[in-house]
Amino acid sequence: AKSRGRSNYQFYDCKMNEKASARLKLENALRQAIEKGEMQLYYQPQYKLGTNELSGCEVLLRWFHGGELISPEVFIPLAEETGFILPLGKWVLEEGCRQGAEWLEEGVNVPSIAINVSAFQFRQEFYRTVDSVLRHTGFPPDLLVLEVTESALMSDVSRTEFLLTQFRELGIQIALDDFGTGYSSLAYLKKFSLDKLKIDRAFIDGLPDDQDDIAITSSILDVAKHLGLETIAEGVETEAQLNFLKAYGCDQVQGFYFSKPLPLNEFELLISSANDR
Ligand code: C2E
Ligand code: CA
Ligand code: CA
Ligand code: CA
């Protein structure tokens, strides 16, 4: 590449530099996002199927940057690649637990709070982080749900078993997120101490008509019931999907049919009106 095609090489080099510098810029901005107050927690309500009682919420991170709302689909992978996911993930956990503890103090009937945990976070000293955050915020462990993905659990199975047992002793709940999309092994469902399976919205999407989605969703619900795991479906958008899930015995639901993820003030209105009922 040195002697021939020199100009070509420079051309690519230049393009790559452009891309790399845009990325570097975003990376630097991401690193400063917390201190600049650009990160916000949104809350999406979760309901018990059957009683329609508010049972929980999932915390979903939003980044307001340069007049734009940047999706977690963009910045979470970037945070994972750069290692920034560790301080960011800790901040989300801290902020969620702090907010939950504040609601409790204000006398609000607080639903469980589910926090997404990246594979990388889960592998690092995460148990100690959770333990310390629970202690200093005073948020009750039994109201905390950690949503972890299969890839987080599968990379080192014996360490995972140990970690999950530790979390269980702490009294928090563990939900297996995006269930069915990854490298699911049913055998591990039995082996790991999990509390909840979260059915990915990819499968809910085609309900109640798509034969594959019907087969996958009903099988997941069946297996979960036999193993004594709670089930939650995400991405519920229609009444027909809801009716299917009800008929097949899914425990909880979350999705645009009920509510999109809400900023703090709107979610507070929702939980305080849930209390009045
Ligand atoms: P996820 O954990 O699978 O979260 C569910 C995603 O589905 C959210 O997208 C949510 O807004 C969206 N959703 C919920 N109900 C519906 C629905 O009825 N229809 C449709 N079409 N979508 C629905 P969001 O908020 O863009 O988050 C994307 C992903 O980013 C999450 O997927 C999660 O993997 C990741 N993420 C978000 N916040 C955090 C965080 O604090 N930490 C980590 N590690 N990851 C996060
Ligand atoms: Ca407040
Ligand atoms: Ca999730
Ligand atoms: Ca998902």
Image (tube, grey):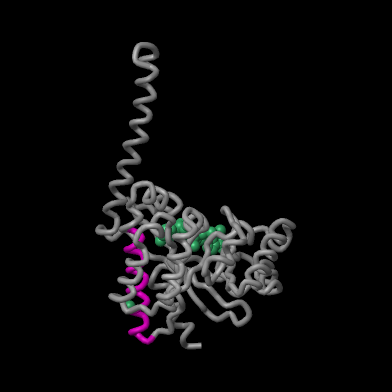
Whether residue 239 appears in this view of the structure is: no
Q: In this view of the protein, which residue sits in the foreground, 269 or 123?
A: 123
Please state the horizontal and vertical placement of residue 68, each as a whole percent of the image. Answer: 37, 52
Q: In this view of the protein, which residue sits in the foreground, 102 or 173?
A: 173
The residue located at (57%, 53%) in the rendering is 183
* In this view, 51 is above or below 167: below
* In this view, 8 is above or below 97: above
* In this view, 89 is above or below 24: below
Q: Is residue 90 magenta?
A: yes
The residue located at (63%, 69%) in the rendering is 224
The stretch in magenta equals 88-107
Q: Is residue 10 left or right of residue 113?
A: left
The residue located at (56%, 71%) in the rendering is 258
Secondary structure of the magenta portion, mostly?
Answer: helix
Please state the horizontal and vertical placement of residue 128, each as a whole percent of the image. Answer: 33, 67
Q: Is residue 39 magenta?
A: no
Picture quadrant where residue 209 is located: bottom right
* In this view, 106 is above or below 125: below
Report the residue that reaches farthest toward the top: 3
Q: In this view of the protein, which residue sits in the foreground, 13 or 93?
A: 93
Whether residue 158 appears in this view of the structure is: yes
Q: Is residue 62 left or right of residue 56?
A: left
Please state the horizontal and vertical placement of residue 72, each as a whole percent of the image. Answer: 43, 54
Please state the horizontal and vertical placement of residue 166, each as a whole percent of the image. Answer: 42, 70
- The quarter of the image holding the N terminus is top left
Report the residue that reaches farthest toward the front: 158
Report the residue that reaches farthest toward the left: 35
